[in-house]
Amino acid sequence: MTTFLDKIRGRTRVVISETERALHICKGELRGILGPGEHSLENGRGTLVVERHALTTPTFRSAYEKALFDKLPEVAEEHLTVVRTGPGEIAIVERDTRIAMVIGPDQRLVLWTAAGPWTSTLIDTEAEPAVPRKLMRRLGEARLTDQVVTAPVTEGSVALLFIDGVLTKVLEAGVHAFWKAGRTVTQKVIDLKRQALDVTGQEVLTLDRVTIRINLSAEYRVVDPVKAATEVKDFADTLYRALQVVFRKQLGALKLDQILERKGEVNAEAAEKIRTDMAAIGVEVSDIILKDVILPGEMREILNKVVTAEKEAEANVIRRREETNATRSLLNTARVMAENPVMLRLKELEALETIAGKVDQLTVHNGTGGLMNDLVRLRDDSAA
């Protein structure tokens, strides 16, 4: 507390607590840094300025920073900790072994030493672009991942890592992390599992000038992710276009009847061309299937009529064949009966048995002799 004597002497008493520090400025001149305790300071004509800084905010920021380091370097070294990073460098700043801050490239950080203890670790991101997994876990727990890019890669996939547009590394399944450090870090995930690609509704003009639509399907998988990602812009789109072009050319050289006869089949030469072209960009193509051939409405009606006529003709042929077989069988039976009277009599008795089952009374003339030796004459008594 400032006393009357202090006022007469032109001085002021200032108390600094353990949780703060203060810059001592008098007559516009920086005199030093005040530590904890009571200080009697010159205050001629009210020119004393005491700039207080709470240690709960450990970063030192003041308009007098440059003057402090230029005029009073020993004082600055006693009270402040300076962390600097160069181009491409990252600094991990820890307090009491816990990560407190992450400093990007070409930066300078000034901390109150009394707010520590502080330790810092410089990382050359050019030499070490990847963030170690243990460090990444600590950064995540501290919620200080602004300087980090993560690249998760699922099982059955790989990722291509690009730094400033240059392919740097192929990443396997897992979670990867890399320092930004003023660079552009991107990744492209490539699925290595077998996949299906459908090409639907493609119009083709046949050799006999009929417009049809076809549906195709192909199975493929990426075997060289680097080629697949760098040789072409989009390997799936490249396969799609290859199927379009090759099959339009193949089917355009055939007549409609030939296409319908071979539906479901794929020209071996056309399929081999697609496989060869795609293998050059790291893609393996297995099954290629012509799934559907879709005709225009009027053409379907014509073909339905043709098919109906063909089926009717086939049915007529079958009926004539059956009638011929039946006539031939009767002729053979007649020949056997003509040559064998006993067989004729057996057939006659079979007929008599069939008739007897359908009438109430049956009279046989000529007795058993006639029944055995002569043609049987029948009379229905009810009709008589």
Image (cartoon, helix red, strand yellow):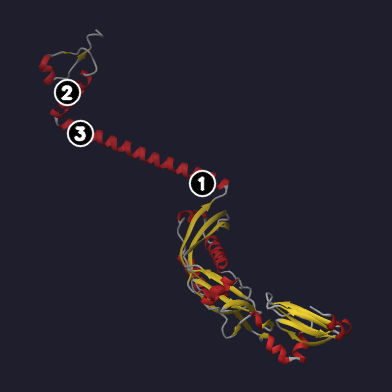
Residue bearing mark 3: 335
Is residue 13 left or right of 245 when viewed as pictured? right
* Mark toward the start of the polypeptide (2 vs 1): 1
Amino acid carrying label 3: it is Arg
Relative to 359, say whether 206 is above or below: below
SS assignment at label 2 = helix
- For discs 3 and 2, the disc positioned in front in the rendered view: 2
Circle 3 crowding by C-alpha within 10 Å: few under 14, some 14–19, many from 20 = few
Amino acid carrying label 2: it is Leu
The residue that appears at 68% across and 74% down in the rendered structure is 56
* Mark toward the start of the polypeptide (3 vs 2): 3
Q: Which residue lies furthest to the top in this view?
A: 384
Give the x, y percent position of residue 36.
70, 81
SS assignment at label 1 = helix
The residue that appears at 71% across and 83% down in the rendered structure is 35
Say whether marks 2 and 1 touch (CB < 8 Å). Answer: no
Please state which of residues 315 and 2 is positioned toward the viewer in this rendering: 2
Residue bearing mark 1: 303
**Residue 50 seen in the figure:** yes
Residue bearing mark 2: 349
